[in-house]
Image: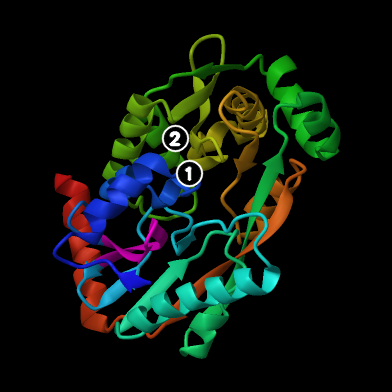
Amino acid sequence: MRLKDNNDSGKDAYRKLCQTEESIPLFSRDWWLDIVCGEDNWDALLINSEKGIIAAMPFYTPKGNVVTMPFYTQTMGPWLQKAPSDTKPVSVLSQRQTRLKFFANHFKAYGSFLQHFHYDITDWLPFYWEGFLQTTRYTYVLENIGNPQLLWEQMATNIRRNIQKAEKRYNLTVLRGVSADELLRMQNYSFKRQQLKPKGTKTLRKLIERSKERGQGDVWGAYEPDGKLHAAVFIAWQSSSAYYIAGGSDPALRESGAHSLLLWKAIQDVAAYSQVFDFEGSMLVGVERFFREFGAKQLPYFAISKGKPSLYERAYIKIKRTISNIFQ
């Protein structure tokens, strides 16, 4: 087991791995990282065996000594090649911890580290042993989304009521293929209502455009018969899971139930690509309740950290992201 020689870029080898390895999560795919990090701001640490790459850990470094999470990226963390089905449990555990220890040893040298691990990574002990901290976060996931009758039955009454209200009282229609401009307009409404400033809007636009080009994402909108848009959502996917990336609604029309209807229709559409739908969180009380009421299963995932960026580093990263959002 060895680290990939830097003369043969870890990123180049990782890009090749992404072309053949379907189990790498969407947010750790090279094309996604190119957009959310910038092509020059991410790399990948690799572990090789005689048979090729057996583990990888992409990471975002907006400044040399800082590893952190980019916008619109729920998780990153290690990817570990699945062991053969006949491997003894003790061997699986030993191999996993050896590989994770390798990554932990490398990243403990950084002044600041923060990554959210995919919920498939349930063992963070090697990072704990190297002095890293862990905070448990939660996402909500629907499984078997190709069975709409089952999904409907598992929903809270409140969500079903909102869907019916949106269709019958407000006569809303859900359309697919809505523009990035419309999604961003709805998102800006939501940010203003919460007295927040939009972040990473150009990054989001590029994600929408690239996902559509790749056939791995789309935007849905809920419209009145006269064309008035109530709400919009952006969803991206791969075969293992679809993800609710971003959305927003007109605050003057929030009582229409449009958001519930949108997600209900979009989930049925993306069932053609995946049988899993990940709501991407949330830790916010109101949002958590909304996702939970769709009948989704709560899944924990780990935020692993060590150290904090200095005041100078935080200012540098903020300015760099602002400039990138202007000129990207």
Numbered tag placed on residue 17 in the rendering:
none
Residue under the image location 62 percent in, 72 percent down: 91
Q: Position of residue 93 (x, y in %)?
A: 62, 73
Which quadrant of the figure contains the C terminus?
A: top left
Is residue 58 located in the magenta-colored stretch of the structure? yes
Q: Position of residue 172 (x, y in %)?
A: 62, 17
- Which quadrant of the structure image shows residue 112? bottom left
95 and 252: which one is in front? 95
Q: Position of residue 269 (x, y in %)?
A: 60, 22
- Amino acid type at mark 2: Met
Q: Are the two marked residues, 2 and 1, in contact with CB atoms closer than 8 angstroms?
A: yes
| Secondary structure of residue under mark 2 | helix
Q: Can I make out residue 173 in this image?
A: yes
Circle 2 residue: 186
- Identify the magenta region: 43-61
289 and 8: which one is in front? 8
Circle 1 residue: 190
- Which quadrant of the structure image shows residue 319? bottom left
Q: Position of residue 56 (x, y in %)?
A: 39, 62
Question: Image check: 227 left or right of 62?
Answer: right
Question: Image check: 207 left or right of 118?
Answer: left
- Amino acid type at mark 1: Ser
